[in-house]
Amino acid sequence: MTAGGPAARRDAAWRKVSSIASIGECMIELRAGGGATSAPAFGGAVAAFGGDSLNTAVYLARLLADRGVAVDYATALGDDPWSSAMIAAWRAEGVGTGLVATLPDRLPGLYMIRTDERGERAFYYWRRQAAARDLLRQPQAGAIVEQLARYGLLYLTGVSVAILDDDRRRLLGLLERARADGALIAFDSNYRARNWAGVADARRWTEAAARVAHLALSGFEDERLLFGDASPEATAERLERLGVSEVAVRSGAEPCVVLSRDGLKRVPAERVAAPLDTTAAGDSFNAAYIAARVLGHGAEQAARHGHALAAAVIRYPGAIIPVEAMPRLP
């Protein structure tokens, strides 16, 4: 590639990003006591909030605080006390809430997490009537779409696509419009079988979203389950064939594979001897990767920053770790 080629121009586009919108769903999170094989706990459950795209937004806001980059979250919530508490918490984290639609007499979704002795999670969901599913069809949808089209970077996941059901075409149209106007698109497939009508449905829409993206941030296990990829390298190469110009494929504690203008690289993960909870490991990796790219770091170094934040996150319970535990970006 020449110095003035498409990749160089895209690197310059990363450095020009001054606003990021993450699109998706946040739910009430209940964390049960005991391990995954113990009796269910209710009275001792701890309530918080979480969701893949929201987790990434929070970590982005922390990493980019005082760096001149606004981070906003686009979703729909109800007019209930839990929704109000969520909005207040996001604002306290520095996440903008101007893209949050409020739907009367609706509620956010809810999920419970139980972790085993290795920190691995089991999830239980109550979300089919969640307000976020109507983000693009409620009365404020037109105004939110217009605002989203003006952001420098849009971030979404497979969950963001899955929950919108009949509005997926409108979402992809929004992404295509924003891309044509110069926005960067980042996408994490984050495949969750329960969110889809079937594997074929999930493959179709996941590929459609990837084709619009400049950056794919994917977990290898999700891609293997959905597309049958034999290795992280195979995932990266398949995504490149779809037109994605930069790919980072996470593999838990194993090295991630980064495919960019500099070729294909394997970037070792930071080892954590006894992870407490792997919730949001991928979400935090994505945030640090994106933040590093916006701040001018190359793809390989961005992956190293992603690993560093993920390693910090899995040492704590829940999706969002204490601010004082955050590694800093140079």
Image: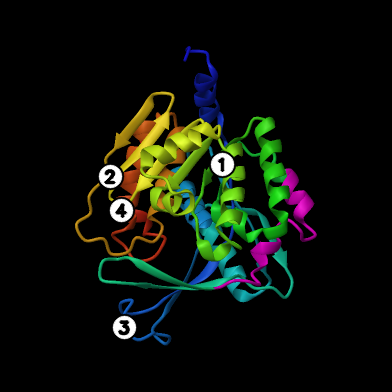
Q: Is residue 247 above or below residue 85?
A: above
* Of labels 4 and 3, the one closer to you: 3
Q: Earlier in the sequence, mark 1 or mark 3?
A: 3
Could you tell me how far apart the alpha carbons at marks 2 and 4 are, in whole angstroms? 12 Å
Could you tell me which residue is drawn at 40 percent across and 70 percent down? 122
Q: Earlier in the sequence, mark 2 or mark 1?
A: 1
**Where in the figure is residue 10, as x and y percent of width and height?**
53, 25
Could you tell me how far apart the alpha carbons at marks 4 and 3 are, in whole angstroms? 27 Å
* Of labels 2 and 1, the one closer to you: 1
Q: Which residues are magenta?
A: 126-146
- Tag 2, which secondary structure? loop
Q: Earlier in the sequence, mark 1 or mark 4?
A: 1
**Where in the figure is residue 56, as x and y percent of width and height?**
48, 51
- Tag 4, which secondary structure? helix
Could you tell me how far apart the alpha carbons at marks 1 and 4 are, in whole angstroms? 28 Å
Could you tell me which residue is drawn at 64 percent across and 58 percent down? 75
Q: From the viewer's side, name the closer residue of 218 and 132.
A: 218
**Where in the figure is residue 167, as x and y percent of width and height?**
72, 55
Q: Check whether the beta carbons of the residues at disc 3 and disc 2 lie within 8 A of each other.
A: no
Q: Is residue 14 above or below residue 121?
A: above
The amino acid pointed to by label 1 is: Ala
* Of labels 2 and 4, the one closer to you: 2
Q: Name the residue tied to disc 3.
A: 38
Q: Is residue 4 magenta?
A: no
Q: Image check: 154 left or right of 168?
A: left
The amino acid pointed to by label 2 is: Ala
Q: Name the residue tied to disc 2.
A: 269
Q: Is residue 86 above or below residue 180?
A: below
Q: Check whether the beta carbons of the residues at disc 1 and disc 4 lie within 8 A of each other.
A: no
Q: Name the residue tied to disc 1.
A: 210
Q: Earlier in the sequence, mark 4 or mark 3?
A: 3
